[in-house]
Image (cartoon, rainbow, N blue to C red):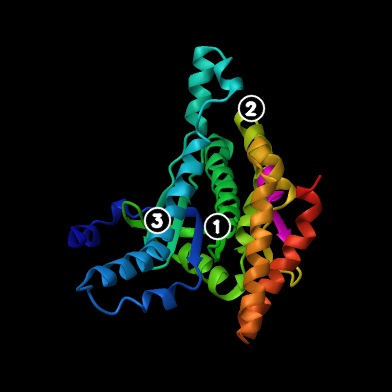
Amino acid sequence: MLKQRLESKEDWQLQYYLVLFFDLLGQREKLRQLTAFPNDEEGGKRIASVLQATVGRVIKLRVGFESFFEGMSTETELSRNLEPDQRELLMQHTQYRMNSFGFSDSFLVFVPLGTNDENCTQMNGVHRSMLAACSIMSIALSEGIAMRGGIDVGLGMELYKGEIYGPCLERTYHLESKQADYHRISVGVELVQYLASVQKQKSMTTFGKCAAALAKQCASLVFKDWDDTLALDYLGDGFKAAAGANSDYTLFVKVVTFADSEKQKWSCAGNTKLAQRYDRLNSYLASRDDIWTK
């Protein structure tokens, strides 16, 4: 099959993709505890505990992301009140394909950004992905799961169905591993420019206007952090407004509690690097406290 694809490149479609790269932090130390297959009940329990704290968390977050993404495809009150032909057309433009796969303690999500219907369908995919990223980040931290990520738009192609390749992947990995630093999702410049271009497009149809509105809302999810790094404001005004009734102050409190306890733990252990990361997380949370206590 690979040889056939090398000989016939007609399936290799180079296009733009939105790519998100997530990494669960602190997994290597846990995985190193898996040194041998268990030969007694106690060993089995120990390995089960390690697996639950590693692969179990990766699967949980991937399922959570996909569930949030797919949940946004359910019909709204507005669509249910439309005429049948309008309703069908709207549903066609609000359905979008999301792909994900994982490796080790990381997982990746990508959405193809072909050009049609004045970016309406594509912006639905981008909008869902960015909201899902904000949601899964806040939920992870509230459950004591440390993670960070990168998100950007770039060129790529699918070597196989569901497998992305190209600079779009390298870019998001760089954002996660080199720029994010602490518990945040670093945003690439290309994504910001893409959102700006959709907002400025001269819309000829209702779908184009919808795309521009979605791009504006997506742009409200991005902020400039203390070090001028662009990042997703996963506990900011934009996300809380979009989440609506699903926003929960108790979740915010859990994130603060986790950040405080980890800061104290690593400070006592003399691990300055990790203590500083949680100190930065605490600073971000403090700057968003008023949003969640309104």
Q: Which residue is mark 3?
A: 59
**Residue with the most extreme top position:** 83
Residue 143 tag number:
1
Q: Which segment did they paint magenta?
A: 216-224
Q: Whole-percent x and y of residue 173?
A: 50, 69
Tell me the SS state at disc 1. Answer: loop
Q: Whole-percent x and y of residue 39?
A: 19, 73
Tell me the SS state at disc 2. Answer: helix
Q: Amino acid at mark 3?
A: Ile
Whether 164 is among the magenta residues is no
Callout 3: 10 Å neighbours few (<14), some, many (20+)? Answer: some
Q: Residue at x 70, y 44 (%)?
A: 240
Q: Which residue is mark 2?
A: 206
Which of marks 1 and 2 precedes in the sequence?
1
Q: Residue at x 60, y 21 (%)?
A: 77
Contact (Cβ within 8 Å) of mark 2 with mark 1:
no
Which of marks 3 and 2 precedes in the sequence?
3
Callout 1: 10 Å neighbours few (<14), some, many (20+)? Answer: few
